[in-house]
Each structure stands twice: as C-alpha cells, then as structure tokens.
C-alpha cells in the first residue's frame, strides 16, 4: 500500500473511524484524541522510537527550553504509561 503524500495521521485516524481503511501511527498520536470506534493492535515485533528536542547547535539551550524538555519528558512518560 502506498503512502498518500500530505495525509496527516489525525486525518487518517478519522478515515479509520469512518471505516475507510487502516493506518499505522506512533503511540502518542494513536492515543491522542478520541478512540471511539477505533481498535488499536500492537505490531510485532514492536516498533520503538525516541522523542527528541532539536535546537540550533551553535547556541546553548536556554533555561526555559531546558525546563520545557524536562517537563515534556515527564508528561510523555505519564501519558504513555496510562491505560
């Protein structure tokens, strides 16, 4: 199956909800928003990914950006461990 250029996962998730097809999405996207009418299946072997912070390499990370990165890490960890 060919990937449709420009189709974002929330749109693809809406198509799944309407019975139009299937999509493969990262866990954060898959768990965000309503899951009404959608069943999630795990893939085997499991696919893993990391979430990273990008910043301009010739400038140090600001205090605010550093705090944001730590906060985001805590929020994502809590989001991904809930059921």
Image (cartoon, rainbow, N blue to C red):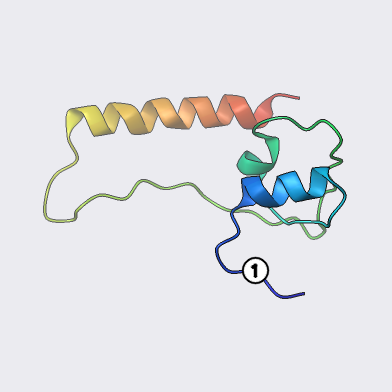
Q: Which image quadrant: the C terminus?
A: top right
Q: Residue at x 79, y 60 (%)?
A: 45
Left or right: 61 with respect to 2? left
Q: Relative to 18, does residue 36 appear above or below in the rendering?
A: above
Question: In the image shown, does 40 or 7 lie closer to the viewer?
Answer: 7
Q: Residue at x 37, y 29 (%)?
A: 70
**SS class of the residue under badge 1?**
loop
Q: Quadrant of residue 62?
A: top left
Q: Residues within 10 Å of mark 1 (few under 14, many from 20)?
A: few
**Residue position marked by numbered label 1 in the rendering:** 4
Image check: 42 left or right of 9?
right
Identity of the residue drawn at 85% across and 48% down: 41
Residue in front for this viewpoint, 31 or 69: 31
Residue at image x 87%, y 41%? 39
**Can you tell which quarter of the image residue 82 is in?**
top right
Residue 26 is at least partly visible in this image = no
Location of residue 2 in the rendering, given as x and y in whole percent from the top left corner: 71, 75
* Quadrant (top left/top right/bottom left/bottom right) for the N terminus: bottom right
What is the quadrant of residue 32 in the picture?
A: top right
Whole-percent x and y of residue 23?
75, 56
Does any portion of residue 43 appear in the rendered image? yes
The front one of 60 and 15 is 15
In the picture provided, is 22 more to the left or to the right than 3?
A: right
Q: Is residue 30 above or below residue 66?
A: below
Q: Position of residue 19 (x, y in %)?
A: 88, 49
Q: How many marks?
A: 1
């Amino acid at each position: 199956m060919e990937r449709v250029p420009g189709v974002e996962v929330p749109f693809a998730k809406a198509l799944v909800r309407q019975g139009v097809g299937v999509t493969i999405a990262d866990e954060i996207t898959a768990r965000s928003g309503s899951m009404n009418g959608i069943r999630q299946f795990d893939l085997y072997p499991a696919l893993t990914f990391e979430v990273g912070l990008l910043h301009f390499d010739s400038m140090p990370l600001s205090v605010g950006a550093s705090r944001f990165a730590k906060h985001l890490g805590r929020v994502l960890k809590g989001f991904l461990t809930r059921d």
